[in-house]
Image (cartoon, rainbow, N blue to C red):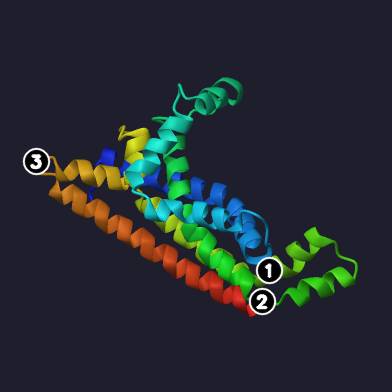
Amino acid sequence: MLDLSPEELSAIGLSLRVASVATVAALPFAVLVAYALARWRFPGHGALNALVHLPLVMPPVVTGFVLLMLFGRHAPLGAFLADHLGLVFAFRWTGAALAAAVMSFPLMVRPIRLAFESIDPRLGAAARSLGANGAWSFALVTLPLAAPGVIVGAILGFAKALGEFGATITFVSSIPGETRTIPAAIYGLLSTPDGDDAALRLAAISAVIAVAALVVSEALQRRAGSRA
């Protein structure tokens, strides 16, 4: 049995909350963007594709700085959200979830897009010919067939959100109990005397959570594939 300190337990719980919220919040947008990139051709298609993948090629610190400029408490957008909707992101756990969602978004979109591209468009057309409108055709035919890809995207997004560090620490810092996730806690422990053991415990727990997510992903994929 691991003897975890309150600080370590706090970092683990916060990481799970941040990764879960980031995944749930980003997944609907990832599905929509993936479908648009897979099935629609429109002006700006290439620009949208580049924008989606920008967090993969841009330094995470730069992404965090951009988020701070956009959603900081004194930034125009951040001030509007705080004053009118009560949403504060900078130096809050909600900001950590936002940063994790942005960084994991490309990894979610890619497998979902590939899943949509592998589906024969004639299946949706057949559903529409039987009276289903576009929304029902998508919900009843296309989305269930793409379910394995959606599951893969969600699990990849969760794993990336769980391990996100650069953008998060730039945007929301490393505040104990508020924004100090597992990666931030490990980074702090490595620069603390006698912190190696605690860092090793957190690294091991992070690896176990990631492996468990992959196992669950495989099981859900097989179930979704058997129902397709």
Q: Which one is nearer the viewer's eye here, 40 or 108?
A: 40
State which quadrant residue 141 falls in: bottom right
Residue 112 percent coordinates (x, y): 57, 65
- Residue at image mark 1: 144
In the picture, the quarter occupied by the N terminus is bottom left
Say above or below: 36 vs 193. below
Cα distance, mark 1 to mark 3? Answer: 52 Å
Q: Which one is nearer the viewer's eye here, 197 or 135?
A: 135
Residue 88 percent coordinates (x, y): 49, 28
Characterize the local packing of mark 1: few (<14), some (14-19) or many (20 or more) Cα atoms within 10 angstroms.
Answer: some
Instruction: Say which label, 1 or 3, has the lower sequence index.
Output: 1
| Residue in view at x 39 percent, y 52 percent | 162
Instruction: Say which label, 2 or 1, has the lower sequence index.
Output: 1
Element under label 2? Answer: helix
**Could you tell whether 33 is left or right of 182 in the image?**
right
| Residue in view at x 60 percent, y 60 percent | 34
Question: Marks 1 and 2: in contact by CB < 8 Å?
Answer: yes
In the picture, the quarter occupied by the C terminus is bottom right
Q: Residue 59 carries which label?
A: none
Residue 67 percent coordinates (x, y): 44, 36
Cα distance, mark 3 to mark 2? Answer: 53 Å
Element under label 1? Answer: helix
Q: Which one is nearer the viewer's eye here, 11 or 148?
A: 148
Residue 40: tell me if it is visible.
yes
Say above or below: 155 vs 121. above
Element under label 3? Answer: loop
- Residue at image mark 2: 227
Residue flagged by tag 3: what amino acid is it?
Answer: Pro
| Residue in view at x 77 percent, y 76 percent | 122
Cα distance, mark 2 to mark 1? Answer: 9 Å
Residue flagged by tag 1: what amino acid is it?
Answer: Pro
- Residue at image mark 3: 193
